[in-house]
Image: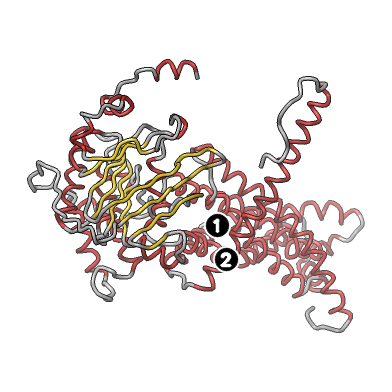
């Protein structure tokens, strides 16, 4: 655990000038797999320095949306702009460069099994050949000191460096994943269910780490989560995505977009049902299916 | 994919329904085969593109060489040794009946360097290395490790596939030479020690019939086999379906398809290289 005191409130320090283009801009995004529509007409802007939580029930396309934001999944319709660059129109080299400005924390941590914790964390530096300091190739000692510093930032001791991902707990793996994603000080951090499968204390540690990374450098964060506590604690803004097959009429797929404080006061039954975790009519739907 | 109309007319008789179902299955299988062939071709083009355009990291190549070459050496050596001995047993049974037991060295060594050495080495590698490659890459796909590479701006084909293909291309001919050597040694050792064949005549007849072209034929084949095993295995691992079942299927498909392709390529190259060799021999080429 880190010795730093926990942060009590969601910081929203970044002043967002209306003249600065949003870091991420999605227009009418549509994604489908084998004729099954997952995302439909998604339009979204994420301002620089903002922390956005994407909530919604399982299978509604939150992870697909998150992966679409850096081109890991290509949409069949619409556009995704990252820092003003259209991901569909860019070359593979430009796309790789844009991706190197992002950090992605995957749901299962996605650490490389064959590498030790230290090698995992140092991997982006070795690959990007020193984007940390200006055009300087970092030697092994420099990389190791950065790795150790990153480990300390996520509250892990140096003695986990030589252990393999399979030898550490799920919570520690998530922290290592955060350290790896954060080591290049990216402009955009993407978290895919960072607290899934963790106990409440470990979940709160992850929430604190997400908030702390914002304090250490200017970063825009997008967090996909089911955990309302996480959404309320770390996010400046929450959007709720509804499954396409449950939409009626011309409803937009994003059924809520606003600050977390407004969530509880919202009148839409779909939103209140989700944030209070009520099955409602869904049990009957399951038995029918 | 659904190119055939699946709507069913209630008045359609059962035998017609069965025919429609069979036709749909055949059409789907053909479409699937063509799609996979196209995907595999594009995958190969990507490998070539990344191989020629970007420098490989030495660390990844050394690791792949170790996995493919060094760790496969014992199993290849053992297989070669036993195949040589089995050939000696079978050849002796036939040749001794017509009083030509001393000629069996030619048959054993010719069979080994032209056919069994390369094919068995490749088959063993398809089982040991190909399945492992498919399972490893498949697990990386399922656990989002390949996505993680892409999210860091690293091309996974360049990082994961190219070193494996290059390592297979470099090391499978070397392993084939090892299999050939061990087979020749095993065949000779068994013939001399157990069957009491004259060692001088054994190698004298071998020299009369087995030449450099035969060895080269085997090595050319092994290059194609290595390339096939690596590309097919990486392709199946890379396009693995989700879950443990998906990884298992990828590993199985990698071996089965590699094995079938090895046999097919062996036949084609056997015919092609012989056609190339015969004019060279008649033209007095000194390959032999």
Res A127 quadrant in image? bottom left
Do the residues bearing badges 1 and 2 touch, measured as CB atoms within 8 Å? yes
What residue lies at 51% left-to-right and 60% top-to-bottom? Answer: B161
Chain name for mark 2: B
* Closer-to-camera residue (A127/B92): A127
* Closer-to-camera residue (B158/A94): A94
Q: Where is residue A106 in the image (x, y as percent from the top left)?
A: 34, 46
Q: Position of residue B277 (x, y in %)?
A: 82, 74
Q: Position of residue A242 (x, y in %)?
A: 38, 34
The quadrant in which the N terminus of chain B is found is top right
**Residue B48 in the image: above or below residue B280:** above
In the image, taking residue A191 as reference, residue B119 lies left or right, namely: right
The residue at which mark 2 appears reads as: B171
Earlier in the chain: of badge 1 and badge 2, it is 1
The residue at which mark 1 appears reads as: B72
In the image, taking residue B243 as reference, residue B210 lies left or right, namely: right
Give the mark toward the camera: 1 or 2. 2
């Amino acid at each position: 655990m880190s010795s730093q005191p926990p942060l009590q409130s969601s910081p929203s320090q970044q002043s967002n000038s209306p003249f600065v283009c949003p870091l991420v801009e999605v227009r009418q995004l549509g994604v489908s797999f084998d004729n099954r529509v997952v995302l439909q007409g998604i339009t979204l802007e994420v301002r620089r320095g903002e922390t956005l939580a994407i909530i919604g029930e399982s299978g509604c396309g939150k992870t697909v949306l998150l992966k679409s934001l850096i081109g890991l999944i290509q949409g069949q319709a619409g556009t995704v702009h990252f820092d003003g660059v259209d991901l569909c129109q860019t070359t593979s080299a430009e796309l790789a460069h844009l991706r190197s400005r992002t950090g992605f924390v995957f749901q299962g941590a996605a650490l490389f099994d064959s590498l030790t914790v230290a090698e995992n964390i140092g991997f982006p530096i070795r690959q990007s050949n020193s984007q940390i300091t200006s055009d300087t190739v970092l030697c092994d000692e420099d990389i190791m000191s950065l790795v150790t510093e990153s480990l300390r930032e996520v509250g892990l001791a140096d003695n986990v460096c030589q252990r393999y991902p399979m030898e550490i707990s799920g919570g520690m793996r998530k922290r290592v994943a955060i350290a790896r994603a954060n080591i290049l000080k990216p402009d955009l951090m993407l978290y895919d269910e960072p607290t899934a499968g963790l106990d409440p204390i470990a979940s709160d540690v992850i929430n604190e780490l997400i908030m702390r990374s914002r304090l250490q450098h200017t970063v825009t964060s997008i967090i996909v989560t089911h955990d309302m506590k996480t959404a309320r604690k770390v996010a400046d803004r929450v959007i709720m995505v509804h499954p396409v097959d449950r939409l009626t009429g011309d409803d937009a797929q994003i059924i809520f977009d606003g600050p977390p404080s407004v969530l509880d006061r919202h009148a839409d039954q779909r939103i209140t049902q989700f944030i209070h975790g009520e099955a409602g009519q869904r049990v009957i739907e399951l038995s029918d299916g | 994919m659904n190119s055939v109309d699946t709507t069913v007319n209630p008045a359609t008789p059962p035998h017609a329904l069965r025919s429609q179902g069979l036709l749909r299955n055949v059409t789907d299988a053909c479409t699937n085969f063509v799609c996979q062939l196209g995907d595999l071709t594009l995958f190969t083009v990507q490998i070539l593109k990344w191989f020629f355009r970007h420098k490989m990291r030495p660390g990844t190549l050394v690791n792949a060489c170790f996995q493919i070459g060094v760790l496969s050496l014992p199993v290849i050596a053992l297989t070669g040794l036993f195949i040589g001995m089995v050939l000696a047993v079978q050849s002796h049974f036939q040749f001794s009946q017509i009083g030509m037991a001393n000629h069996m060295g030619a048959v054993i060594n010719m069979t080994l360097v032209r056919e069994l050495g390369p094919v068995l080495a490749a088959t063993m590698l398809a089982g040991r290395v190909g399945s492992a490659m498919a399972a490893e890459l498949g697990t990386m796909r399922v656990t989002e490790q390949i996505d993680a590479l892409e999210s860091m701006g690293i091309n996974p084909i360049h990082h994961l596939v190219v070193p494996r293909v290059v390592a297979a291309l470099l090391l499978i001919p070397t392993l084939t030479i090892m299999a050939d050597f061990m087979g020749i040694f095993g065949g000779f050792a068994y013939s001399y020690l157990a069957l009491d064949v004259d060692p001088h005549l054994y190698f004298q007849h071998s020299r009369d019939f087995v030449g450099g072209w035969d060895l080269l034929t085997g090595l050319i084949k092994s290059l194609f086999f290595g390339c096939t095993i690596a590309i097919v295995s990486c392709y199946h691992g890379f396009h693995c379906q989700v879950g443990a079942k998906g990884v298992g299927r990828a590993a199985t498909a990698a071996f089965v398809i590699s094995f079938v392709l090895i046999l097919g390529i062996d036949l084609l190259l056997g015919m092609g290289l012989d056609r190339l060799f015969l004019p060279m021999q008649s033209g007095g080429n000194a390959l032999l």
